[in-house]
Amino acid sequence: MSVSDQPLVGIIMGSASDAEVVQKAQDQLDAFGLPYEVIVASAHRNPDKVRSWAAALAGRGVKVVIAAAGKAAALPGVVAGFTTLPVIGVPIKTSDLGGLDSLLSIVQMPSGVPVATVAINGAKNAAILACEIIASGDSAYAAKMRQYKEDMAHA
């Protein structure tokens, strides 16, 4: 995990069982050299922890949030309700409905509370999108994104 006094990406997962999927985001952020922090907090079981963490992000210099959740998947929307930062939801594949439940929960946000959403278990894409968002205002990360896209085109 990238350790920094000032993470630019906040990653939250609803359960420790989501860690395997979330690791793909962490690996990609590490590849970009993008500092991040990770916490586990459920919108249902730890709502006060989610609220206090999300509300403090912008004041600590975080620029983007990645929120991973399965089943009812309320976490990305709850986080979006407590911050003005962009939130990227990662629906986690579930044993019950294969992640469709998670996907639909995240994409069906009410007007005024947007959450960008990637594919089921799409944590790597969430990290790439987070870097693209940060790159829009940071030339160093913009250069990393250009190089990443070039490398991908020649792979």
Image: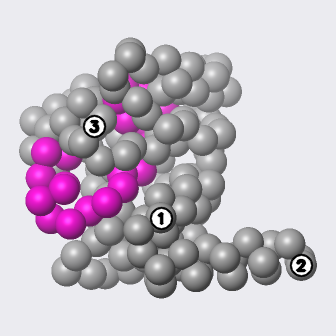
Task: Please count the marks in the image.
Answer: 3
* Position of residue 17 measured from the top left corner of the image (x, y, whole percent): 45, 46
Q: Is residue 8 above or below residue 75?
A: below
The amino acid type of the residue labelled 2 equals His
The amino acid type of the residue labelled 3 equals Val
**What residue does disc 3 label?**
79
Q: Earlier in the sequence, mark 1 or mark 2?
A: 1
Q: Is residue 62 above or below residue 92?
A: below
In the drawing, does residue 90 fall left or right of residue 124?
left
**What residue does disc 2 label?**
154
Which of the image's four quarters has the C terminus?
bottom right
Tell me what residue is drawn at x 46 percent, y 44 percent.
Answer: 88
In the drawing, does residue 153 fall left or right of residue 18?
right
* Position of residue 57 measured from the top left corner of the image (x, y, whole percent): 19, 55
Q: Callout 2: 10 Å neighbours few (<14), some, many (20+)? A: few
The amino acid type of the residue labelled 1 equals Ser
Tell me what residue is drawn at x 79 percent, y 80 percent.
Answer: 151
Secondary structure of the residue carrying tag 3 is: helix
Q: Callout 3: 10 Å neighbours few (<14), some, many (20+)? A: many
Q: CA distance from mark 1 to mark 3?
A: 22 Å
Which of the image's four quarters has the N terminus?
bottom left
Q: Earlier in the sequence, mark 3 or mark 2?
A: 3
* Position of residue 123 measured from the top left corner of the image (x, y, whole percent): 57, 53
Res. 90 visible in picture: yes
Name which quarter of the figure residue 92 lies in: top right
**What residue does disc 1 label?**
136
Tell me what residue is drawn at x 61 percent, y 74 percent.
Answer: 145
